[in-house]
Image: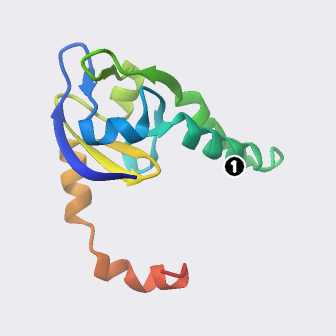
C-alpha cells in the first residue's frame, strides 16, 4: 500500500529519489503521467494496466471520454529507477506540474502523486475533511 507524505528535491537534471518506503510497492519500473489538480501520477505497472483498461472502456464516441483518455495517455511514459533509486521526470511533465526544486511525494494507496511544494501547501490549506465528509457519505464512506 502506498501511503505517506515525503519531501524531496529534484536535482539539476530533473531526477527525483523515490522514497524507500514506496519503492517496494511501486516496483523498479512504473508509469508516470499527468495527474489531476496539477500534480503527476505514478502507477505501478499492474495498477497502470488496471487504469488503462478502464480508460479503454470509455466510449470513443463521447468527446469528454476522448479528452480524458488523451490527457492521461499523451503524458504517460515508462520509467525505471536507477541504482541510487532515482528517476528522471521528463521536462514536459516537470513543466506541467510546475516542479522546480522542492517537491512533495504522496502515497495514495494505488498510486503516487508528485506535487510542487507550493501547490501541495495550497492544496493542504484548502483540504478539510469536515467540509467534504457529507459528500463522501453519498459515495458510501
Taking 43 as reference, is 91 above or below it? above
- Residue 65 relative to residue 6: left or right: right
- Residue in the image at 34% along x and 35% along y: 23
- Residue 5 relative to residue 112: left or right: left
Picture coordinates of residue 133 (x, y %)? 38, 82
Identify which residue, 24 or 39, lies in the foreground.
Answer: 24
- Residue in the image at 42% along x and 26% along y: 28
- Residue in the image at 19% along x and 64% along y: 125
Residue to which mark 1 is pinned: 54
Picture coordinates of residue 95 (x, y %)? 34, 27
Residue 137 visible? The answer is yes
Residue 68 visible? The answer is no
- Residue 39 relative to residue 8: left or right: right
Q: Which image quadrant is residue 109 in?
A: bottom left
Would you call the spot at circle 1 few (<14 residues within 10 Å), some (14-19), or many (20 or more)? few
Picture coordinates of residue 49 (x, y %)? 63, 39
- Residue in the image at 36% along x and 21% along y: 81
Q: Which image quadrant is residue 12 in?
A: top left
Residue at the limit of the structure toward the front, as seen here: 24
Picture coordinates of residue 65 (x, y %)? 70, 49
Amino acid at each position: 500500500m502506498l501511503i505517506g507524505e515525503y519531501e524531496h528535491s529534484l536535482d539539476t537534471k530533473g531526477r527525483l529519489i523515490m522514497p524507500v518506503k514506496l519503492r517496494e510497492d511501486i516496483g523498479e519500473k512504473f508509469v508516470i503521467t499527468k495527474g489531476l489538480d496539477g500534480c503527476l501520477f505514478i502507477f505501478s505497472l499492474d495498477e497502470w494496466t488496471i487504469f488503462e483498461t478502464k480508460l479503454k472502456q470509455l466510449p470513443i464516441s463521447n468527446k469528454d471520454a476522448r479528452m480524458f483518455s488523451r490527457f492521461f495517455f499523451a503524458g504517460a511514459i515508462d520509467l525505471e529507477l536507477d541504482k541510487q533509486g532515482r528517476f528522471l521526470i521528463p521536462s514536459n511533465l516537470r513543466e506541467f506540474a510546475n516542479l522546480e526544486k522542492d517537491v512533495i511525494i504522496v502515497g495514495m494507496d494505488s498510486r503516487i502523486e508528485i506535487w510542487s511544494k507550493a501547490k501541495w501547501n495550497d492544496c493542504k490549506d484548502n483540504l478539510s475533511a469536515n467540509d467534504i465528509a457529507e459528500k463522501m457519505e453519498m459515495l458510501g464512506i
